[in-house]
Amino acid sequence: AVEGGGPALAAYRCILLGGGALNPATIARAHEAGLRLYASYGMTETCSQVANSLIDESFTGGMKLLPGYQARIVEPDGRGFGRLAVRGPGVLSNYLNARAAFTADGFFLTGDVAALHEGKIYVKERTTDMFVSGGENVYPAEIADKLMAIPGVADAYVFGAPDPVWGRRPVAFIERTSKASERGSRDQAFDKLSPVKTARFGREVIKPQVRRHAPKPLAPSRQSDRAFVASVHDQLEDVLSKLYHPKQIFVMESLPRQGIGKIDRAAIERIYSECLDVRRVILHRVRIPFKKPFVTAKATLEFRESVIVEVVDAKGRVGLGECVAFSSDWYLPETIEQDIEILRGTLAPKVIGEVFLHPREVSAAFASIPGMERFPLACGAIEPALWDLYGKIVGKPLGRLLAEEYDVIERAAHRERVHGKTRTPFGNAREAAVSAGAVVGMGSVEETIASVSRCVEAGYCRVKLKVAPGSLGVVRMIRQKYPHLFITLDANQSFTDRSIAELRALDPLNVAWIEEPIDLTPCGGSTARAFARLAALQRTIATPICLDESFVNEREAYQALSYPELRCFAVKVAKFGGVEAALKFIFAARSRGREVWMGGMYDTGISKRMHAAFQTLDEVVMPGDIGSTSRYFDVDVTMPPYTAERGKVTLNRAGYEFGLGCGLSPEAISSVQTDRIVIE
């Protein structure tokens, strides 16, 4: 308002500031605009203000009492500061259904600490906010003042959070200034109210004064929130004792406020009560046999080895994730052995060592670790566990959390919702169900047709066939038997230039897409050459090409988006390093008109539930590889078991309404577990 309405506001004789501590940046901008600001003091119990003063060059922080009002300081300290009590025509006589605090001679105790000097009130902070830490009194307002003196901090709120060692420790929430404000002139900014000795009346008192400070250098570009918090911690080292230094500092886009603009303290403390405070991480290494060997063009799998991740918070609540790396690098560069070491030595300690307000912050924390971009599957094993835990903390199913975060991503990009869709509210009903696709491995013609028939009879509306050169005849036979079936193919890069004619023969069969049709080894490991090769092939065939293993991480997925011919992507959350990055990619892909669907990794009900939750998004419309685990495994490590009844997966059944919607089955885990690692 000051920046946009300066000329109009300058015509006012008085603009009253109240409801909280003075903001130096606001005062500086107002003075530059020539506005007449008045500082005021009061509260609801005094029918608004009881004192005010013009903020000019002579302003030292004191506010003069209005006619008819009196003030006194109860139990002043050696500097004259004590409990402020007021009396006058606007002061309440009592509360409804409660008693107000009055002195014996009728002065109302405000709850603020202040000093009186020459008829003016100098307010310091609220005694009701004071807390004891390690036997010492801590005043949050003093910490907030120091925070707001740091360039880039627009506002701050500090309170005492429970601590098992000290009783309470200060925790700070800060709001950053806008980029425009950070570029503004800081040589006009007023520093915080600073105690300076000025007079004696019976004892030495402190008279707060406002003083200007020299311009402070700014970074040429806006820091990330994590880097900014680290900078704030560094700057506080010089101005706060260890007792006063906040245990945690959280950045919010804007601090929650009440209707009159005051910081909503209860809302902030509620947000903190919902934070992710992990104390223990458990890695369950498991080895689950397939019912029968699963055959692809690249490998034959007899068992699935993976790692189930448990994160346990301070209250014993559990979140689950799954590492979907294989024991060798036949599919992706990472292996289970590598990821276990990364999880145990780096990621688990990182999660335990920090407190997060929201699981989206975990992605940024991992990105700050040098070299971690090489291990997306490890990151994608533990980051989703924090989303599951958060859902259980705030009482929401994962699908709803995903929809909310997708909207946050959309707003941040300043774009309209894709295709003008209206968000379907997840969770209005107690349970949500999504359509599943089934995967059929390679086998004889008879075996393959029989497997497809079982999938159709089970209610699956999409069937994916594993194929290779010479096996496409079975696709033609299945299409003849099921003319309306939603069929997709996965070639696992098995076709070569010599067999491309077979791919062109697919065009009349109405196959929805074929994943990874051609061998990319001639590209010499160059993703640019691989995507160009796929794009060139797409220009010669009608069947859409879908990308899966040709990109192994987030960076390569975005690179593929630059090829307009590549219109379809299988999204496997782990390859992006977790939920947050996968959501951002889905937004980027859908914004460019590409199709996305949720893939599978022969995973357990933990990873499958996560992918099924993604399918509740309006932007993910194709049935994913989220079929029942009982099609492959005799053992289901989750409870309730992960099933697809009549081709649909039901999420968050009764008793498991929040987060992923499942827990671990102790009996099943013990039957397939080969190792258990605990990090605390």
Image (cartoon, rainbow, N blue to C red):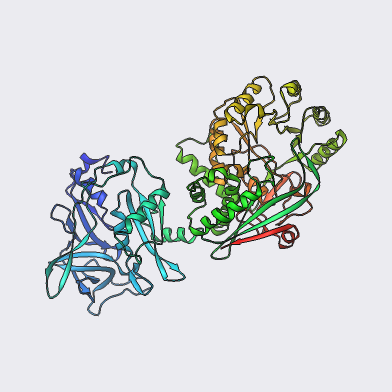
**What residue occupies the far right of the structure in this picture?**
446
- Residue 454, horizontal then vertical, whole percent: 83, 41
430 up-or-down from 536: above or below: below
User: Foreground residue, 350 or 10?
Assistant: 350
Direction front: furthest residue: 524
Can the viewer see residue 48? no
Q: Can residue 623 be seen by looking at this rendering?
A: yes
Q: Report whether 133 appears left or right of 280.
A: left
Q: Position of residue 32 (x, y in %)?
A: 20, 43
Q: Which residue corresponds to the image point at 26% horizontal and 55% vertical from the top-left?
A: 22
Question: The N terminus lies in which quarter of the figure?
Answer: top left
| In this rendering, position of residue 87 left or right of residue 576 | left
Q: Quadrant of the C terminus?
A: bottom right
Residue 465 at x, y percent in the picture: 76, 35
Indicate the quadrant where residue 98 lies: bottom left
**Between residues 436 and 515, which one lies in front from this camera angle?**
515
* Residue 379 placement, left or right of 125: right
From what the image shows, is residue 534 above or below residue 120?
A: above
Q: Nearer the viewer, residue 657 or 570?
A: 570
Q: Which residue: 33% across, 40% down?
A: 220
| Quadrant hosting residue 556 | top right
Displayed quadrant of residue 598: top right
Residue 215 is left or right of residue 586, and the answer is left
The location of residue 129, given as percent across then percent down, is 34, 67
